[in-house]
Image (cartoon, grey):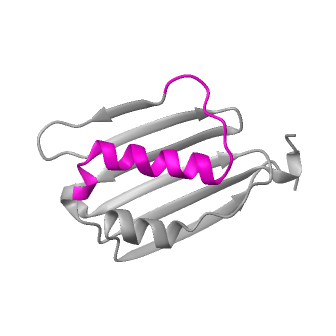
Amino acid sequence: MFRRDALTETFVDADGCAPLLLRDAERQRLLLDEIVTTLELHVVGQPQWFKFPGEGGVTGLYLLSESHLSIHTYPEWGLATLNLYCCRPRPDFDWEGRLRTLLEAGSVSVRTVSRGLSP
């Protein structure tokens, strides 16, 4: 059930990541699949992926019945940024633990903002 008071957008920045891991599109796909499964989200259609040429990073976008989930990696900066917009209550996800493990992140910042609230 979608609820206006449950509209949230989560911004995640993982810094100090291993550049080689940030170039690995399969690793990013596994991460987003894990997020979808853990948070009981529902993918609509096929996820979209783009691997930038050469030493470039990866961009992935999942359209969800709850809204969207995305990742952008920047190997040249050791940075991965994720965004989850959701319109229903959901379980917690261990952003810091998983990004430290999967991308060897040195630091992880997670900010969740309520959306759609009237002033």
Residue 17 position by quadrant: bottom left
What residue appears at the point 55 percent right and 43 percent down from the top-left corner? Answer: 69
Q: Is residue 7 magenta?
A: no
Q: Residue 82 appears at what percent x and percent y?
A: 48, 53
Q: Vertically, is 96 above or below 37?
A: below
Q: Is residue 55 left or right of residue 107?
A: left
Q: Vertically, is 75 above or below 36?
A: below
Residue at the bottom extreme, as displayed: 106
**Frontmost residue, 37 versus 57:** 37
Q: Is residue 38 magenta?
A: yes
* Quarter of the picture holding the C terminus: bottom right
Q: Vertically, is 86 above or below 114?
A: above
* Quarter of the picture holding the N terminus: top right
Residue 49 position by quadrant: top left
What residue appears at the point 77 percent right and 44 percent down from the top-left corner? Answer: 87
Q: Is residue 27 left or right of residue 94?
A: left
Q: Is residue 109 left or right of residue 57?
A: right
**Which secondary structure is most common in the magenta stretch?**
helix
**Frontmost residue, 59 versus 30:** 30
Q: Residue 18 appears at what percent x and percent y?
A: 23, 65
What residue appears at the point 75 percent right and 55 percent down from the top-left corner? Answer: 90
Q: Residue 104 appears at what percent x and percent y?
A: 31, 70
Q: Is residue 12 visible?
A: yes
Q: Residue 57 appears at what percent x and percent y?
A: 25, 46
Magenta stretch bounds: 21-46
Residue at the top extreme, as displayed: 45
Q: Is residue 76 visible?
A: no
**Frontmost residue, 62 versus 4:** 62
